Amino acid sequence: MAMLLAAPFRLVYLHAFPRADYGAARCYVTGQRGTDVLLFCPDAAPRTRVIDGNDPEFTRRSDVESIFTRPGTSSAR
């Protein structure tokens, strides 16, 4: 129960999301509204951010993986 206070339910139980790169950061697309994209970047600060989907630093990737995947490994689904 204490973990749910630190992390949203959706990230804990539904943890496979489309990969994306934002600059040099490894990120996951966790939501989108219009051109705004909600990113979760586990190795960067701040970890969650809303960006413009047309930002030149933003690149969608074709793979889907768990947000708990360590850098350098792959858990494509």
Image (cartoon, rainbow, N blue to C red):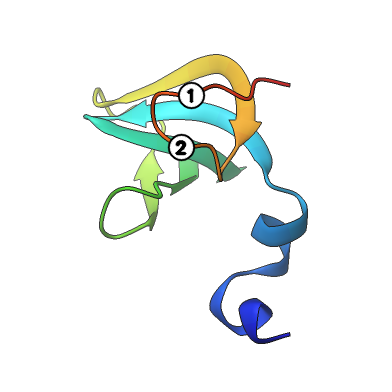
Q: Residue 48 is drawn in which quadrant? A: bottom left
- 69 relative to 1 in the view: left or right: left
Residue 33 visible in the current orientation: no
- 24 relative to 51 in the view: left or right: left
Tell me what residue is drawn at x 36 percent, y 34 percent.
26
Comparing 4 with 73, the one in front is: 73
Tell me what residue is drawn at x 27 percent, y 50 percent.
44
Secondary element under disc 2, as helix, strand or loop, is: loop
Residue 63 visible in the current orientation: yes
Residue 43, horizontal then vertical, whole percent: 32, 48
Amino acid carrying mark 2 in the image? Arg
Secondary element under disc 1, as helix, strand or loop, is: loop
Q: Mark 2 points at which residue?
A: 70
Q: Residue 59 is drawn in which quadrant? A: top left
Tell me what residue is drawn at x 46 percent, y 43 percent.
36
Residue 9, horizontal then vertical, whole percent: 72, 67
- 20 relative to 74 in the view: left or right: left
Residue 63, horizontal then vertical, whole percent: 59, 17
- As drawn, the label of residue 73 is 1
Comparing 11 with 74, the one in front is: 74
Amino acid carrying mark 1 in the image? Thr
Q: How crowded is mark 2: few (under 14 residues within 10 Å), some or many (20 or more)?
A: few
Q: Work out which quarter of the rendered image holds the C terminus and state it.
A: top right
Q: How crowded is mark 1: few (under 14 residues within 10 Å), some or many (20 or more)?
A: few
Q: Dots 1 and 2: beta carbons under 8 Å?
A: yes
Residue 68, horizontal then vertical, whole percent: 56, 45
